[in-house]
Image (cartoon, rainbow, N blue to C red):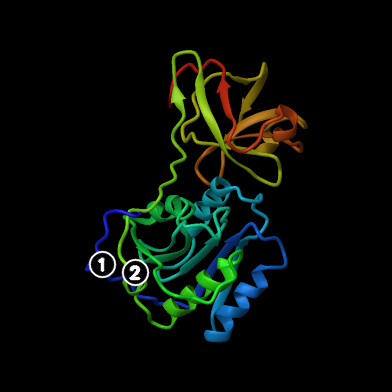
Amino acid sequence: MPNNRNSHSKTTTKITTKIITIITDFGSFYPAQMKGVILSKVPDAVLVDIAHDIPAQDIRAGAFALMSSVGYFPRGTVHLAVIDPGVGTNRLGVVVVSGGHLFVGPDNGLLMPAAKSLGKPETYMIDHEFETAPTFHGRDVFAPVVAMLLLGEKPERFGPRIKPIDLDFGEARFAKDQIEAQIIFVDNFGNLILNMRKIPSGQLRLMDRNLKRVNTYAEAERSEPLITRGSHGLAEIAVNQGNAARLFGLSSGDRIVLGRAICLE
């Protein structure tokens, strides 16, 4: 059961836009049904797709993509996120309030990195009766909740405040002669995004291959492995005009060891 319940806590977040972002692992078909539910109740809603090609059931990848996107939207935006391998079980649905934004989705950690990037989250359980199909809460629970929020319902009206399931990407570990890091996302180009913000000076190696330190991909030769700080602020390993995931045989969630680091910037 959830803990830290506090149904008397009040949030001051107000919906000042009708912008809704949507991120799922559903592909091209099912998101339209969610949009239809919202638009049938709020015809002038502005629906923005973040992505629907998140790898199936990959909560960490969805959490990273959501976290990387929310800061570019105005206060008052509602973010609907559904990567939900526990759909139909006793996992909770939640509304999260943070930094003037609202997040709606399953309580499986998916929403938390994004919410924490904007402020100090407050999380409310969705304890509300909906007529649902057991396998599509995105359409039958979360989309109606989004519409209700846009129409003025307060987050605390859906249920008590709870302590949510958290998801933490962790941080790379720096030692004298190596760095231990984790791949938290692999993008469509095969770039490996790491849980590392600072890139040490000096030569770095991965699996006996040198990684050229660059500011832009084109500073490396064609097919040359490289490391750079991506637009999301995290280190990424890439191959100029190539695919680092394929070259190294790595995927999201894998842990890697980077060879000798000399000093931190």
Q: Quadrant of residue 256?
A: top right
Kind of residue indicated by mark 1? Ser
Tell me: 15 left or right of 68: left
The residue singled out by tag 1 in the image is: 7
Image location of residue 189, percent across then percent down: 71, 43
* Location of residue 196 with respect to 25 vertically, above or below: above
Depth check, front residue: 94 or 193: 94
Tell me: 124 left or right of 197: left
* Location of residue 261 with respect to 55 vertically, above or below: above
Kind of residue indicated by mark 2? Gly
Looking at the figure, which quarter contains the C terminus?
Answer: top left
Image location of residue 25, percent across then percent down: 64, 57
Looking at the figure, which quarter contains the N terminus?
Answer: bottom left
Image location of residue 88, percent across then percent down: 55, 61
Asked if one can make out residue 75 in the rendered structure from this viewpoint, the answer is yes
Q: If you read the primary sequence from the N terminus, does the residue marked by circle 2 or circle 1 appear first?
A: 1
* Location of residue 181 with respect to 49 vertically, above or below: above
Q: Are marks 2 and 1 in contact (CB under 8 Å)?
A: yes
Asked if one can make out residue 224 in the rendered structure from this viewpoint, the answer is no
Depth check, front residue: 91 or 40: 91
The residue singled out by tag 2 in the image is: 159
